[in-house]
């Protein structure tokens, strides 16, 4: 999903996600993306589509690293985070925001030990309504499945390669195709949907991102965790096949059949 689409969905309350895994190598745009997303969430512009505006006080404070509503988990250990770091981080998030949102950031989250991740589970499961969590990582597989299942994933490499055209229109096309990938509509309609928006391997990976986001949201909204976890596993299998150069259309059509049980 695009930066502005994420900001819009959170601002309008259409996203049920409150935690995001931002996947990308540190220094490859991940840190800048997290900063821009934080600016967009705190931005005071009345026009959601223009956030972050970069000019309001909130944007400038986030950019300067002086915002009271952007909290980074501090690393006190010589080689990684400690349980006291997680406790202090969670305690600050429990205090709530001064402005619109309180944004909690964990840099290099893949370095979190299993013990520290378990310490953070309650924060991920039962956050305050005004808390948004951003976990920056190059290796999300290093995170516990219980952590991953409570987060939506933003893959920066795929996001940077979204095709030309209106951002909102493209987002809607991908959402529609993702819904059909999950089982909505007839197979012929799904075939037409992917022909419309999937023209490259990167497009196919973006479509899977949208489908996975839907399944995670359904899991958090009360759908069977086991069923949604199985769907996420099928999506990751299709992703791996596409990354190994399997024909993207063949992989997506097979995934649709697997997800619908046909």
Image (cartoon, rainbow, N blue to C red):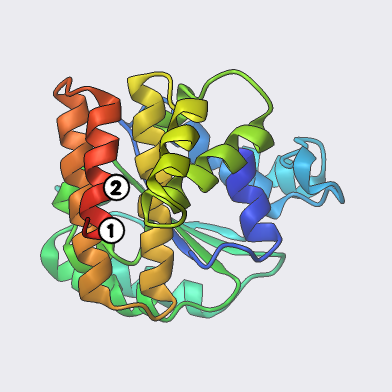
Q: Quadrant of residue 245?
A: top left
- Classify residue 224 by image quadrant: bottom left
> Residue 161: x and y, percent?
46, 21
Q: Nearer the viewer, residue 130 or 181?
A: 181
Q: Is residue 31 left or right of residue 258?
A: right
Q: Residues within 10 Å of mark 2 (few under 14, many from 20)?
A: many
Most extreme residue toward the right, as rendered?
46
Q: CA distance from mark 1 to mark 2?
A: 6 Å
Residue drawn at point x = 17 percent, y = 24 percent: 246
SS type, badge 1:
helix
- At horizontal 78% and vertical 38% (from top left) the residue drawn is 50
Residue 3 visible? The answer is yes
Asked if marks 1 and 2 touch (Cβ < 8 Å), the reply is yes
Q: Quadrant of the C terminus?
A: bottom left
Q: Position of residue 103 (x, y in %)?
A: 54, 59
Image position, residue 76 (x, y; %): 26, 57
Asked whether residue 2 appears in the rendered view, the answer is no
- Local SS, label 2: helix
In the figure, is residue 90 to the left or right of 17? left
Identify the disc placed on residue 256.
2
- Left or right: residue 89 versus residue 32 is left
Percent coordinates x, y for residue 221 in the rendering? 44, 77
**Which one is nearer the viewer's eye here, 214 or 39?**
214
Label at residue 260 = 1
Disc 1 crowd rating (10 Å Cα; few below 14, some 14-19, many 20+) is: few
């Amino acid at each position: 999903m695009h930066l502005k689409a994420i900001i819009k969905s959170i601002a309008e309350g259409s996203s049920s996600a409150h935690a995001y895994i931002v996947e990308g190598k540190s220094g490859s745009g991940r840190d800048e993306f997290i900063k821009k997303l934080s600016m967009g969430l705190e931005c005071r512009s009345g026009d959601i589509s223009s956030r972050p505006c970069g000019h309001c006080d909130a944007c400038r404070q986030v950019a300067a690293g002086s915002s009271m509503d952007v909290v980074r988990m501090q690393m006190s250990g010589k080689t990684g985070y400690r349980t006291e770091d997680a406790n202090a981080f969670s305690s600050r998030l429990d205090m709530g925001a001064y402005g619109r949102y309180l944004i909690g950031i964990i840099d290099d989250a893949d370095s979190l030990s299993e013990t520290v991740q378990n310490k953070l589970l309650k924060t991920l499961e039962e956050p305050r309504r005004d808390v948004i969590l951003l976990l920056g990582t190059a290796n999300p597989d290093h995170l516990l499945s219980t952590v991953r299942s409570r987060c939506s994933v933003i893959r920066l490499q795929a996001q940077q390669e979204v095709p030309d055209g209106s951002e909102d229109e493209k987002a809607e096309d991908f959402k529609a195709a993702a819904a059909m990938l999950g089982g909505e509509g007839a197979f012929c309609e799904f075939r037409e949907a992917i022909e419309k928006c999937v023209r490259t391997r990167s497009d196919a990976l973006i479509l899977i991102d949208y489908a996975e986001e839907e399944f995670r949201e359904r899991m958090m909204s009360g759908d069977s965790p086991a069923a949604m976890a199985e769907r996420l596993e099928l999506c990751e299998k299709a992703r791996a096949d596409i990354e190994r150069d399997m024909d993207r259309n063949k992989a997506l059509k097979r995934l649709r059949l697997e997800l619908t049980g046909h």
